[in-house]
Image (cartoon, helix red, strand yellow):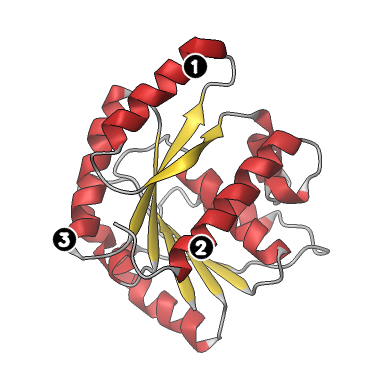
Amino acid sequence: MKIITFASQKGGVSKTTTAFCVAADLARRGGRVAAIDSDSQGSLALWAKGRPVDRPQIPVAAVSPQNLKAAIDVARKDRYDWLVIDTPPTGAPLEVETAYKHSDLIVIPVTPSAIDIAASGVTVKLARQLRRPFIILISLADPKLSGMFERSWVAEARRELNQFGTLYPGCIVKRRAYQRAFMNGLGVSEMGDDAAAQREISQLTDWIIRQVNSEAVA
């Protein structure tokens, strides 16, 4: 079983949204997928409750950080192919240390803002301390920006984030399709009404699979 943890020490970076979209895309591809929601807001578990019965089911265990290890053991015993873990934003990284320790890959969403870039260093530091593979993902990019200004704006964020480690070459744009997907218990790759969002998640999932199957990410 491969474990993908979505983590950030700051809220509002599209961590849960990216987690359920990737989980749904993995399931769409035929993998047996389970998830753990250790965020007290319970958004991932709420998404799963609305999942249509005609889609591959993704059981979500809502647990406290202290019970993560037991939930991971259950998923491993049930022989899932993939386990997606959504962690809480917190100023105390040790609360989610268990998830980090057992991860095959930690995905760290970061919006291209100075505040979020600075905050991502805490998550990166813990991943490095625990010697776990991680990637940094630019999220919630503004779709209204275009042309040279957009390229300059994103390029500046990339320059800042490159110092921390492996940076995903694409980004996740802020789109209404992600909100609609959440309300319908789906991933954007299952909805068929926004080709750009589908492409973003499909490419991210492809990249995650390649990174998990590589020898190291850091």
Quadrant where the image shows the C terminus: bottom left
Question: Residue at point 55% right, 85% down?
Answer: 79
Q: Secondary structure at mark 1?
A: helix
Q: Which mark is residue 210?
A: 2
Residue at the disc numbered 3? 129
**How busy is the neighbourhood of tag 3: few (under 14 within 10 Å), some, or many (20 plus)?**
few
- Residue 70 percent coordinates (x, y): 38, 79
Amino acid under disc 2: Arg
Name the residue located 24 percent from the left edge and 49 percent from the top edge. 124
Residues 39 and 30: in front is 30
Residue wearing tag 1: 150
Residue 164: name its quadrant: top left
Q: Where does residue 94 sit, x and y in percent of width and height?
A: 20, 59
Dot 3 amino acid type: Gln
Please, is residue 71 above or below residue 36 in the view? below
Is disc 3 in contact with disc 2, using a CB cutoff of under 8 Å?
Answer: no
Q: Earlier in the sequence, mark 2 or mark 1?
A: 1
